[in-house]
Image: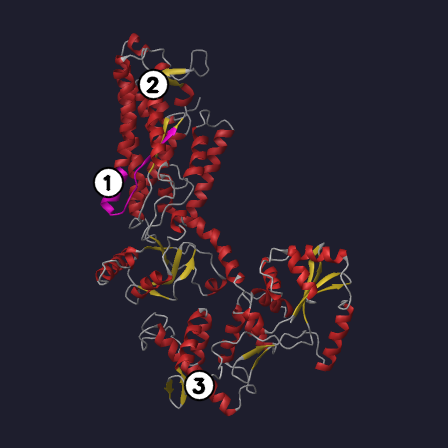
Amino acid sequence: TGTGTGTGNDINNVKKTIDASAAPLVAPKRILNADNDNNSTSISIINTEDIKMPTELLQKRVNAYKSFSPTVQTLFARAVNLHSDSSSSSSSSFPDAYSDEEAYATAIIIKVYQIEQTRMKEGTTNTAPMDLLDIANAQAGYETLPPPVQYMVKEMMDLKSCTNNTEIVEKLVVKNKVTRTNDGGVEFKMEDPGDENGDENKNGDMKKEKEARGENRDFTEKEVDSALKLYDNLPMAMKIMLAQSVNVKNESNSTAVVTRLIEEKKLLPSEDGVEFVVFGSGDEMNNLDLEFGNEQKENAGMEFVMGMLPEVTRKEGMGPTEEDAMDFFRLLGKKTFNPRNKPEKIPGGYVIRGENKKANGEELVQALDAMLKESGSTTGTGVGVGDKLYYYYMKDPTVVTQEQFDQGDFENPVIVLTGNNLAPTTNRFVKPIVTVFGGFSIASFAVAVCLSTDLKMDIEVMETMTSPLLFAVLGTQIAHEFMHQLVALKDKFKAGAPTIVPSLQLGVQGCITPILSPPPNLNSLFDFAISGPLVGMIISVGLLYAGLEKQVFMDAATQAGLPSIPVDLVRSSSLAGGMIEWLLGDGTLVSTEGGPSTLIKLHPYAIAGFIGIVTNALNLLPVGNTDGGRVAQAMFGRSFAKFIRGTTLVLMVGAGLFGGDEANLLLFFAIFAQVWQKEPEVPCKNEIDGVSDERAILAFMTAFLVGLAVVPLST
């Protein structure tokens, strides 16, 4: 029984008290408490020494035990001397003497049942001091209380400083607020801590309190308004509980809920505002549809998971089913990945916590792949669980719970399961259309730089200027994408067709190549990401040098007929600009008046080389799921890669807004990446074993090259 008071103007004045005269708050009856439903004449019986236990009851309580937190399971195991301690030869969650978790749970439940029945026969159920079994029952009961009631208990008993449920229950036992019941269960007694009088005084106090609250008078209009304001400012969990207490399905309908609360005398006027009075036994509270507790936890962790995993892993209706997850779970064991619990639902899939029993992640992946392949060959249909989902051995993408923190379980890698369709959700017609526009954009750029020199677009100009530029740019992009596909083929994962992205400044922004299935490891992701742009940059530097070398030996008349591009654009790259001034002479990118010139004539190969250097370097910047973002994710992990991404975007936008990038290449690319490539990359099968030292050295060397390519040339 609980009451809450407060005014709509000051939600912080809401007080939560317990009606001192009401019956004790009883924890929801645990399945582990004997329910005395021993209809042995109608159901089968299991003999456990000299005590008979109904099979139906046994299975019911085993299922309940497996739903408990690991802490509660351990308490029950210790209470009946079946705990799997560290001295066991196996690091499994159950001793070697038992074949699996089900057998271990069954043994524990039978022992618990025997102890309960013995106590009831001896008449010591509610007279003996609390022992470890009672503590286990108490914590199991407390953990299933609705979150608002848990909060109320902590507040009333001054336990808000407690960091976990075990500490709360222990202090409740010390305060004598948890007692053993006649049926072997436990009972939480939440009387007012300051009230030490008998029931007679409590009843009198309750009557006076109700009179003082104005239970027998109607609400004023002002008090109704206060009630509405108060309700609107309550946490969603409390709104749902109040709405369900008066059978209103829509908790967002404030007027309907408050009106019903007033009618049923569960909302009363008081001197300082209004007061909620919600009556109900523990069983009634447990029977409420209190899914909001789980929903709140899921919502709290959903954004975190969404930040760690890309959207393609959370396609609606495409994730693995619970049956698929359990089929995968059954393949695990002491020789591969020893699970601590069953698959837990996360957005888009499931997470399995446990311990890798192999020497490293690579061996684990090889073992799991072999098991999944074998499972498919034994199904008759040839379709196994490996054909229905993807798995990833990675750092936990979920929010760390207090329980995981207390147990030191938050740093252990997990297995994440998602659906097996990682294709982008973009409409199938969008990518071809964008690619067509990309090709048209490259061609338009090639024509525009020729027209800027007042060249007449005849066949000769097309053959000597426009076509070489067009095919050199396209050739660089093709080489870039070919390397991506080559690595994917070598490492046996799928990569989608590239989408050519147009650009108003360079003709082409680059290509987007999606990964459609998980790479085997971070080395593979690194190779896939860096191979394309690195080869593209090498080819582009060669094109730039070749074009400048040709231009140096041209006469003045021939150079006058070369295509032109803006000097500001060329100066946006220290690498390209430095090569131009080195081969064409110092001051080439500065007019005789000392200011930047408008246009500079360059050979088509040189222009293509410049475009390739810049576009490939931009794609190596660590943002989103660009090639650079993939490299950062492989090098530093998902969490730190997010930090690097944010820092890089801030620097790029700052350079564009405050004059550090006069051509605004960085600014426009930052906008492009944030809109179309902001998601993290799909996970690898093995994200725990890091990249090799050789790849790390290559990454830092490439980062230096990228810096030269995207930092503007100093004046």
Q: Nearer the viewer, mark 2 or mark 3?
A: 3
x, y percentage for residue 573?
A: 39, 26
Distance between the Cα atoms at labels 3 and 1?
68 Å
Mark 3 crowdedness (10 Å alpha carbons): few <14, some 14-19, many ≥20: few
Q: Which residues are magenta?
A: 483-502
- Residue bearing the label numbered 2: 447
Q: Which residue is mark 1?
A: 486
Taking 451 as reference, is 692 above or below it?
below
Of labels 1 and 2, earlier in sequence is 2
**Relative to residue 662, is residue 281 depicted above or below?**
below
The residue singled out by tag 3 in the image is: 39
Can you tell which quarter of the image residue 343 is in? bottom left
Instruction: Give the residue type at disc 2.
Output: Val
Residue 197 shown in magenta: no
What element does badge 3 sit on?
Answer: loop
Q: Viewer-proximal residue, 42 or 21? A: 42
Measure the C-alpha gap from mark 1 to mark 2.
Answer: 32 Å
First of labels 3, 1 by sequence position: 3
Kindly identify the residue that appears in the image at 39 percent across and 59 percent down: 351
Please, what is the three-letter code of the amino acid marked with disc 1? Leu
Please name whichever residue, 374 or 597, is drawn nearer the observer in this view of the structure.
Answer: 374
686 and 342: which is toward the camera: 342
